[in-house]
Image (tube, helix red, strand yellow):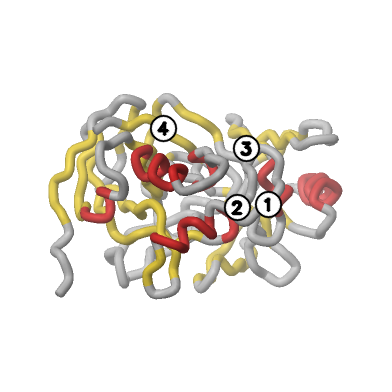
Amino acid sequence: MNVTGLFVYPLKSARGLTLAEASLDSFGIEGDRRWCLLGTDGKVITQRDCQALATLRARPTGQGLELEAPGMGALSVRRPAEDRDLLPIGVWKDRTRGAPADPAADAWLEDFLGRPCRLLYMPREVHRQVSLDFGREGDRVSYADGYPLLLTSGASLTELNRRLDTAVPMDRFRANLVVDGDRPFEEDDWARIRVGEMEFRVVKPCARCVVTTVDQQTGERGPEPLRALASFRSDGGKVLFGQNLIHSGPGRLRIGDPVEVLERRTPSG
């Protein structure tokens, strides 16, 4: 097996960027989901309730981000100063913090999304602990849903698309790493893998939500592929596709890197 896709999402729930190679820091792929939008309810805003985020581009710059969206002029946003007061934000069950960007960015985003929000950046001093149900003390994550990286398989997508009237692309699953493979869903059995020179713990399957039904190019929503997935990939009420990873340390990944299974999960029962 080899790596066939690498992706980063600088702003949580905005459009992803394709990479040829990636550096990994303590958060995961460098810059991945270090920015997010804070709603008036104190929680993170995502495509679950704001589909327009799929059409918002956020590109990293040396100073921060450049935002682009349909019908809007581009906006450069500076990374907040280190001494900015941090604001609390809820990311699902977690409470974490973020440094607010310039209010001009908030106004631009509100104009585009049609709802009030604040743009936050997670500075290095903020440590959001990965769930100890699957991670270890000290494992950290940015504003991603719960884990530093997500892996999906081209063979698994092929099997899913075989069950759909209209095939969906891999971008529906917003993975960081995509690998090829011979057997659909063989990644369910992995416990530890090596990708290039890096090692990863494969800690749990990824439970999927309505974001998979959002076209990542247009922001339009439909019933698939979640409905088809639920028919054959449901476990305990959760619909599964892909695997969450925790990396062993800093390093680099490249398209074409070989993937080796070092350890497999022990079958339950």
Residue 25 placement: quadrant: top left
Depth check, front residue: 73 or 240: 240
- Using the image, determine if residue 163 lies above or below residue 85: above
Question: Relative to 236, does residue 220 appear above or below in the rendering?
Answer: above
Whole-angstrom CA distance, mark 2 to mark 3, is 30 Å
Q: Which mark is residue 64?
A: 3
Q: CA distance from mark 2 to mark 1?
A: 5 Å
Circle 1 residue: 221
204 relative to 196 in the view: left or right: right
Which secondary structure lies at badge 1? Answer: loop
In the picture, which quadrant includes the N terminus?
Answer: top left
Q: Find the distance from the CA under tag 3 to the CA under tag 1.
A: 30 Å
Where residue 226 appears, x then y in whole percent? Answer: 53, 57
Q: Badge 3 local density, few (<14 within 10 Å), some, or many (20+)?
A: some
Residue contact at pointers 2 and 1, CB within 8 angstroms: yes
Viewer-nearest of discs 2 and 4:
2
Is 51 placed above or below 255 here? below
Crowding near the residue tagged with mark 4, few <14, some 14–19, many ≥20 C-alpha atoms within 10 Å: many
SS at circle 4: strand
* Residue 252 place in picture, x, y as percent: 32, 32
Left or right of 144 on screen, residue 150: left
Q: Give the number of the disc on residue 213.
A: 2
Q: Residue 5 bears which disc, if any?
A: 4
For disc 2, the neighbor class at 10 Å (few under 14, some 14 to 19, many from 20) is many
* Element class at badge 2: helix
